[in-house]
Amino acid sequence: MAQYAKITKILQSPSVPVVGQPLFIDVYLQNIGSVARKMWPGVTRYDGITFHVYDELSRMHVLLMPGETHAWGGQFVMPNRDVTVYVESWAEGDDGVWRKDDSMSKLVELAPTPPPPVGAAEFQNLSCSYSKV
């Protein structure tokens, strides 16, 4: 449970990703503490593969005021399967040491593959035969 850097949401775009296309991930952190604190989503990965997220000024960590929410974004190419995006938030403690504070996962599902149209060229010469044994 978060003490300082709460992950409030993980958003994906497009909402229904396609194999081989970029998938954009936005991670939102909120300072739920009572003092300004540096924080960032220090670990971001899908199925064990790390990808990096940055804010709009290409910063990794940001000083957030109490109650303030900030977004970081990153991307990766959607593989040929559903993936789970995992995020950890990290916050700098009063002693200057960075610590893991929160984590969240989100399942990203591929767009369903539509069936080929009836009469598609590649199926015009398809025939099937069988014999009784």
Image (tube, rainbow, N blue to C red):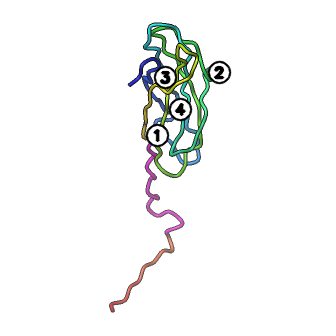
For marks 2 and 1, the one nearer the N-term is 1
Q: Residue at x 52, y 17 (%)?
A: 93
> Marks 4/2: CA distance?
16 Å
Amino acid of disc 2: Arg
For marks 4 and 2, the one nearer the N-term is 4
Where is residue 41 drawn, in percent x and y? 54, 27
Q: Residue at x 46, y 29 (%)?
A: 10
Residue denoted by label 4: 25
Where is residue 34 drawn, in percent x and y? 44, 7
Q: Are marks 1 and 3 in contact (CB under 8 Å)?
A: no
Report whether 133 appears left or right of 17. left
Q: What segment carries the magenta color?
A: 108-123
Confirm whether the magenta stretch covers residue 103.
no
Are there few (<14), some (14-19), or many (20+) residues within 10 Å of tag 4? many
Label annotation for residue 59: 2
* Element at label 2: loop
Residue denoted by label 3: 28
Along the viewing direction, whichever of 86 and 19 lies nearer the viewer? 86
Confirm whether the magenta stretch covers residue 114.
yes
Q: Main secondary structure of the magenta part?
A: loop
Where is residue 31 drawn, in percent x and y? 47, 14
Amino acid of disc 3: Tyr
* Element at label 3: strand
Q: Are marks 3 and 4 in contact (CB under 8 Å)?
A: no
Report whether 42 appears left or right of 130. right
Are there few (<14), some (14-19), or many (20+) residues within 10 Å of tag 1? few
Residue farthest front in this picture: 95
* Element at label 4: strand
Amino acid of disc 4: Ile
